[in-house]
Amino acid sequence: MEPLIIEGTPKTPTVKFDAETGVVEIKGRSIPENSVEFYKPLVDWLEEYKASPASKTQVNIQLEYFNTSSSKCILDVFKKLEAIHKAKHDVEINWYYEEDDEDMLEAGEDYESIIRIPFKMIEIVE
Amino acid sequence: MSFNIEDYYTDQNGGEILLAYKGSITTELINNVLDTVESKLQDFNEASKIRKKVYNVLVESLQNLFHHIDDLPEKFRETYESHFGILVVSKEKTQYKISTGNFIRSEKVQYLKEKIDKINSLSKEELKEMYKFILNHQKISEKGGGGLGLVDIARKTGNKLDYVFDKFDEEFYFFNLDVYIDESNN
């Protein structure tokens, strides 16, 4: 399966999804006016990946900002990962937030309470 | 006396203005505003926590405008561009203030007013629950909104949403929303 690589822009994150290594990364800013368009290939990729995932899927989410339009799309991404987890595959979610950014920590906790996969909350200290 | 846009715009210009704009709310405008305000916040040497809050709330405010602006009343169609909105970002003593204004069709006023009143009546914990409920249960609209913007703003600022609906004519109201972000948050 081809990896999904998308370069970041000031309003959309860098994406690196690799089926070989099982590493799924979203980093940067996610504040587009229309996020459905941006996230569709990510959700589609995970749908395909779900059929034969790596022995361990490691998810790294490191967002500086995201808007409410992205928040629903990010939930869709997590729902795909939840399905992989439910099918008894190993899925680890690392939620990164910058020092003092309580809003971002809280956002991670919101997702964790909806998605039944334990999150590792990782504070980035500069 | 009928509502006057120019008076309204002048009235908004109190405090230290980071940015004031009236005109068409487009994607390019949003990009420019975000860049400008971000670099001004850097200049102010504001703590990163506050900088991020202001930026986040600004993104939501602008995108709310972008997605929900109604047409202009007929008498303004010659004077102002379509997708007309007003935005003022200012700093007053220990608070940042983000003011937005736009025309809204009369029939939408009641719904929006009730929604804001509801949000304003909720505690921090209740807002969190409301946010999670909408996030998990409501379909995302074609526009990419989804009814989370105002809830998110209220949650992040911890302040009440301050609003006025000024009647313009039978068909239109002018909707003004003021959002405050405290410098010493929590």
Image: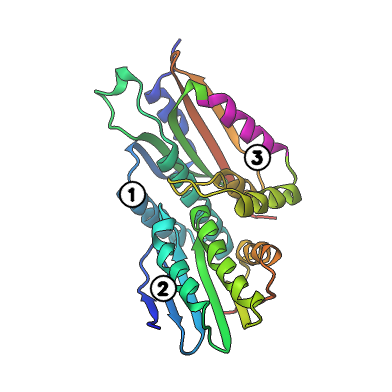
Q: Residue at x 41, y 34 (%)?
A: B69
On whether residue B110 falls in the magenta region, the answer is: yes
Where residue B7 appears, x then y in whole percent?
41, 23
Circle 1 marks a residue in which chain? B
Q: CA distance from mark 1 to mark 2?
A: 20 Å
Q: Which residue is mark 2?
A: A14
Where residue B68 appears, x then y in whole percent?
44, 37
Question: In which image quadrant can residue B143 be found?
Answer: top left
Density class for disc 1 (Cα within 10 Å; few <14, some 14-19, many ≥20) is: some
For the residues bearing labels 1 and 3, Cβ distance under 8 angstroms:
no
The magenta span reads B108-121
Three-letter code, disc 2: Thr
**In this image, B46 relative to A112: left or right?**
left
Q: Which residue is mark 1?
A: B27
As drawn, which residue projects farthest toward the left? B78
Q: Residue at x 46, y 33 (%)?
A: B12
Where residue B181 appears, x then y in whole percent?
59, 48
The answer to whether residue B185 is visible is yes
Q: Which residue is mark 3?
A: B160
Asked if marks 1 and 2 fall on the same chain, the answer is: no
Three-letter code, disc 3: Lys
Foreground residue among B110 and B5:
B110
Quarter in which the C terminus of chain B is drawn: bottom right
**In this image, B102 relative to B32: left or right?**
right
On whether residue A121 falls in the magenta region, the answer is: no
- Circle 3: element type: loop
